[in-house]
Image (tube, rainbow, N blue to C red):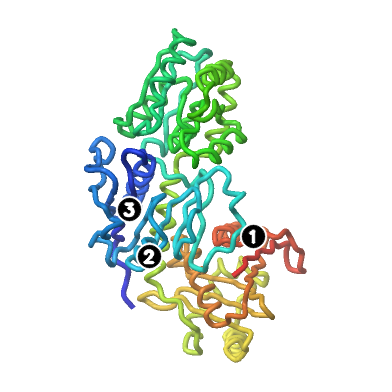
Amino acid sequence: MTAAPSGPEAIILTEAGPGRGLGHLGRCLALAEALEEYGARPRLFVRGIDRVPKELAAAVPAEAAEWLDELPLALSGCGIAAVDSYEAPARAYARVAGAARIGVWLDDTRRLDYPPGLVVDSGLRVAARGGERLPLGTAALRGPRFQPLRRPFWAPALRPLRDDIEAILVVMGGTDVRGLVPRVVSALSAAFPLAKLDVVRGDRSAAAMAEAMARADLAVTAAGQALFELAAMGLPSVGIVAAGNQRSNADGWVDAGFLRLAGAWRDPELDRSIVRAVGECWPRDVRERSSRAGRALCDGRGALRVAERAVNAWRASWLAVRPASIADEAALLAVSNDPQVRAASFDSEQITVGEHHAWLEERLRDPGSVLFVIEDASGVVGIIRFAVERATASVSIALAPRVRGRGLAVPLLERGLSGLVAARPDVTRAVALVRADNGASRALFAAAGFTGEGPVEPREATSVHFARAL
């Protein structure tokens, strides 16, 4: 078995330019920066523009490329490939998935059935799109906490809000595709002549944007990607829907208490609505509630969360998941008798050699048992067990200390589930019973798409039952 290289090559494909704005580019740059933090080597390819603005991509290798016409050669065999597009067809994603070890698909509209990989859906109303059966090998990272924001927003310096609104930030997207800036500025200047207006025209670095947000008391903004940065900064905002795909998120921000929605770009009374909404935000207590709501939803660290999951999945891809045999007996006993494994089990007593030998022989003979070992270049590092009854499989997973705590459990469990379905296509549901005090296992199954179905109380300990459709 080949050991994993020191870090993956990561290829990111996105689009920008007139009619598209810079939102996709911004979050892909954020993902690239975060991937570097986890040891990856990212390169960015952007379609729709002649060049990538240096003020935006100074720290990331980036180039203009019509990658829908011809995929970059660098994609072949890369460790991680990410796509952020509202235009690429399903066949393009399939080609990218076939070229890379791990795929990352960024989309807040879920417009396609994506290939296996990480689907990043940072929309505010993802619960309305939840509940679908994801293909095996696919993990959904849902909600604003996974929105990739650029480095200055990872740990922003927040300042107390002033009593009055002295400075208003105007952000109509990187390219102001609706030409809203003159209209917004005119309305604000007439209604609030003492307020200083700072108009962003798409030519500022992430650091400059964070500084501008820190100086402002309120933002008037298109209801696109900028709202996530504004929320992370705790800057109260008045929103304008500038594209049809912004409506759902805008309504979600309103429901959460962060955003005042002035209306849509075509509304004939938009000017008056903007002024009215700004006036409603004037009291400091109103803006403080908005600020708290924004920070509660989006803390700015989404890019790091996505990058960590992607790099961990890449690392896990270098481990083998194979059927167990009697030759694995000693290695499996060592994993099973690890003190942390025993402490998390319902029966915490050490397992004797004789007991384990009898158990393993029985499991290998039992047609209702599916047993996989996890192996790295140095040997067995874990076990995934399934006990099948009718169409349901009960699952447990245990890892050796040398690989524990590296974020490998979720992708390895996913591979085990894929192996289960391949071996037993009649299985349509996986369940797990976890001790209520075992926070790590509860977090593992939740992250792997299992739904907690409430506590149960067997004799040994209070437990939580998890289930997932396959």
Q: Amino acid at mark 2?
A: Ala
Q: Amino acid at mark 1?
A: Thr
Q: Do the residues under discs 3 and 2 have CB atoms within 8 angstroms?
A: no
Picture disc at residue 198: none
Q: Which residue is mark 2?
A: 97
Query: Residue at 28% across / 37% down in the picture?
Result: 56
Q: Amino acid at mark 3?
A: Leu
Q: Which residue is mark 1?
A: 451
When the figure is inspected, residue 403 is found, relative to residue 262, above or below; the finding is below
Q: Earlier in the sequence, mark 1 or mark 3?
A: 3
Marks 3 and 2 sit apart, C-alpha to C-alpha, by 12 Å
Crowding at mark 1 (Cα within 10 Å: few <14, some 14-19, many 20+): some
Q: Quadrant of the N terminus?
A: bottom left
Q: Do the residues under discs 1 and 2 have CB atoms within 8 angstroms?
A: no
Marks 1 and 3 sit apart, C-alpha to C-alpha, by 32 Å
Q: Earlier in the sequence, mark 3 or mark 2?
A: 3
Q: Earlier in the sequence, mark 1 or mark 2?
A: 2
Q: Which residue is mark 3?
A: 13
Q: Nearer the viewer, residue 442 or 403?
A: 442
| Callout in the foreground (1, 2) | 2
| Picture coordinates of residue 109, whole percent (x, y) | 50, 49
Q: Nearer the viewer, residue 10 or 311?
A: 10
Query: Residue at 56% across / 22% down in the picture?
Result: 287
| Callout in the foreground (1, 3) | 3
| Picture coordinates of residue 151, whole percent (x, y) | 36, 39
Crowding at mark 2 (Cα within 10 Å: few <14, some 14-19, many 20+): many
Marks 1 and 2 sit apart, C-alpha to C-alpha, by 27 Å
| Picture coordinates of residue 428, whole percent (x, y) | 63, 74
Helix or strand or loop: what does disc 3 sit on? strand
Helix or strand or loop: what does disc 1 sit on? strand
